[in-house]
Image (cartoon, coloured by chain):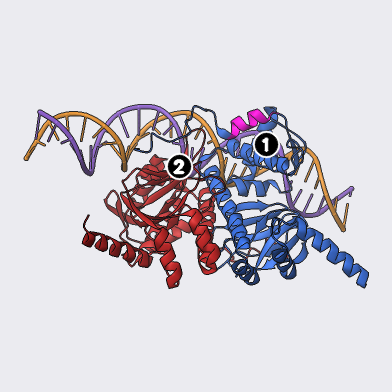
Chain colours: A blue, B red, C purple, D orange
Amino acid sequence: MKATDRAVETGIQMQAMSTSVMCQGLDREAHERLFCISSVQHIPAKTAIYFEGDLPERLFEVLEGVVKLYQMTLDGHRQITGFAYPGQVFGLGWNGTCPTTAEALTSSRLCSYPLAKLERIAVELPTFGVRLFRMISAELVAAHGHMLLLGRKSAIQKMASFLLALSHRNLEQGADPDQLHLPMTRTDIADYLGLTIETVSRTITLLCRMGVIALPQRHDPTILNILLLMQMAEGERSDFRPRCSWQSSL
Amino acid sequence: MKATDRAVETGIQMQAMSTSVMCQGLDREAHERLFCISSVQHIPAKTAIYFEGDLPERLFEVLEGVVKLYQMTLDGHRQITGFAYPGQVFGLGWNGTCPTTAEALTSSRLCSYPLAKLERIAVELPTFGVRLFRMISAELVAAHGHMLLLGRKSAIQKMASFLLALSHRNLEQGADPDQLHLPMTRTDIADYLGLTIETVSRTITLLCRMGVIALPQRHDPTILNILLLMQMAEGERSDFRPRCSWQSSL
DNA sequence: CGATCCTTTGAGAGGTCTCAATTCGCGTGG
DNA sequence: CCACGCGAATTGAGACCTCTCAAAGGATCG
């Protein structure tokens, strides 16, 4: 590699860092310290990044691609706890060992930071520590929401919620909220929603027949009626009061 | 209240603080600063502490009693995301608003800290910030584990896992791991495990008939065969390999 | 163009839910 | 002290949703 190439590469990397969610809003010092300990790597599709039970070593940010995080039961069932898209962080939230396996869904580009050095930065630059805390808080909120989906929603509600979440993500990214893309297989969707692959397939077919979505390509559904989709995600009856006063004796 | 009473009360409170999980292992300065912003309160049973959607204001630690945390779907279903026992903290992990409602299951004594002041302490005393981070990490790990239970376990597996978790908690607390106590109703258990009240009841009856547990009192099961219970929690087949090499193309 | 994996679709079984009735436990008041 | 009432828990019967097993239809890639 020539010197000019290295310079170009560093330039690309610095650009990646400045757009990184890890760095946004941080002062110059934090920014530079993060850059110094960061490293960018390419991961081919279907490759594990770390395993459930490993000792956590690095924090990852997705630059390109999608990563799935999952846990296994001892009898061989799998539960995907989340998908990490570009701009999202994973590898946070361990308790001794990694609770999940991380595996690249598609060919991905990741930026990673050694946890030990990250902790030192967090200790020395409290604003960065607060940022890390915000990130893991967001993950916990998402986890709580997903627990509600897994425990209390029907197959159609789960599927509708999933599609709406993807739509919402598109909106945030400035993409068309109706043109979705599913980089994961039906098996992955099933393991994320707590269903079987057949039920996922049948539910998608059902949504198509109802005219709520279209499916020109198997991995690229289009939302045709987002209002109906939202209704389906929430369930039938909407005669619900915001405050649960019948529960509380207040 | 007389001065001596106040002194006694303060003594009790300081004792509570020194045994508090929030304080364990912290230096004298952090300890004292926490004590200054802390307040202890009693909450009667079935009383909400905060509501889903509220602006988070305080972090709570359970001193006595049990608190349940839950979310509602728009069609009126409930998912309990966790129970907080003495020595456990809740109110951490928000993203704008509280993701869950917190409600005292039994008459409880709580110690709470204003979040704003807590953040200041975390910024000024990084070791405390790290401690907060560890706490929320543990919550995230628990949430992931519960997602696996909700999405991929049968009614018996869920019930067995629940009882084992309580048993494990007893063990940590130095109590008899076989003598359990369920302060929550069957409805609460159902909403925690993603089942109906009837299925919970039937599953408990089944476990009794199999001789895995006994039920002298409705809220106080006894584990008779913990090995079998562990087997049931994990599922039938145990021909499972620790590393998921069939998934990864490594 | 065959091989393989992913996906769809069907039929049937099974687990969990729903609805309903009964029993149990406990506090209240006669 | 006992009868009563109410909520919680248990139990039963049947329906329904989802899973399981099986086969066929597509997509992709060498």
Contact (Cβ within 8 Å) of mark 2 with mark 1: no
Q: B249 or A237: nearer the eye? A: A237
Which one is nearer the viewer's eye here, A93 or B244? A93
Q: Is residue A168 above or below residue B242?
A: above
Residue range in magenta is: A225-233
Q: Is residue A95 visible?
A: no
- The residue lying at 81 percent from left, 63 percent from top is A13
Tag in front: 2 or 1: 2
Q: Observer-nearest residue: A76 or B17?
A: B17
Label annotation for residue B51: 2
The residue sitting at 47% across, 37% down in the picture is B77
**Residue on which the image places disc 1:** A204
Are there few (<14), some (14-19), or many (20+) residues within 10 Å of tag 2? Answer: many
Would residue B168 appear left or right of A43 to someone viewing this image?
left
Q: Quadrant of the image for the C terminus of chain A? A: top left
Main SS, magenta residues: helix
Q: Chain of mark 1?
A: A
Amino acid type of the residue tagged 1 in the rendering: Ile
Image quarter for residue B242? bottom right
Figure check: A160 above or below A134: above
Residue B61: image location, x then y, percent:
40, 57
Tell me, yes or no, if residue B102 can be seen here. Answer: yes
Residue in the picture at 38% in, 34% down: A246
Residues behind callouts 2 and 1 on a single chain: no
Residue A235: x and y, percent?
A: 55, 32
Kind of residue indicated by mark 2: Phe
Q: Chain of mark 2?
A: B
Q: Is residue B24 above or below residue A156?
A: below
Helix or strand or loop: what does disc 1 sit on? helix
